[in-house]
Image (cartoon, rainbow, N blue to C red):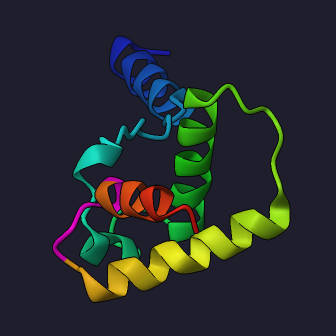
Amino acid sequence: MNKFAHVTVTLALWAFSTVSAPAQVTIDVSKITCHQFLLFTVADPHDIAMWLSGFYNSKKNNTVIDTQQFKEHAKKLNDICESNIRMTVMEAAEKLLATGE
């Protein structure tokens, strides 16, 4: 095999052997607006609500999840965001928690 063919085969094998890794995406939840939340712009609202639930429950050292209450809070968070699309999701969550609903 001549030198050119060897280089061509090596480059072809190298090109096909590389594995593309998915890009890692980080999100600052404190900057997500209700508008973005409602339109699925950043992530699935359910995923954001789950993260918020964990965040606020960990602040209270609560390791128990009430699935029914989570669903109710997620719905109320959605309602607050629909009425206040410029508010951040974290502000909406804090408003929800402050009302004790």
Residue 54 in the image, given as x and y percentages of width and height: 62, 41
Residue 70 in the image, given as x and y percentages of width and height: 71, 63
Instruction: Indicate the quadrant where residue 79 lies.
Output: bottom left
User: Where does the magenta region start and end?
Assistant: 86-90
Looking at the picture, does residue 96 appear above or below residue 7?
Answer: below
Residue 100 in the image, given as x and y percentages of width and height: 55, 61
In the picture provided, is 88 more to the left or to the right than 8?
Answer: left
Looking at the picture, does residue 38 appear above or below residue 25?
Answer: below
Residue at 50% across, 34% down: 21
Picture quarter with the C terminus = bottom right
In the picture provided, is 70 more to the left or to the right than 79?
Answer: right
Residue 36 in the image, given as x and y percentages of width and height: 29, 71
Residue at 39% across, 54% down: 94
Q: Which secondary structure dominates the residues rendered in magenta?
A: loop
One can see residue 39 in this view: no
In the picture provided, is 63 more to the left or to the right than 17?
Answer: right
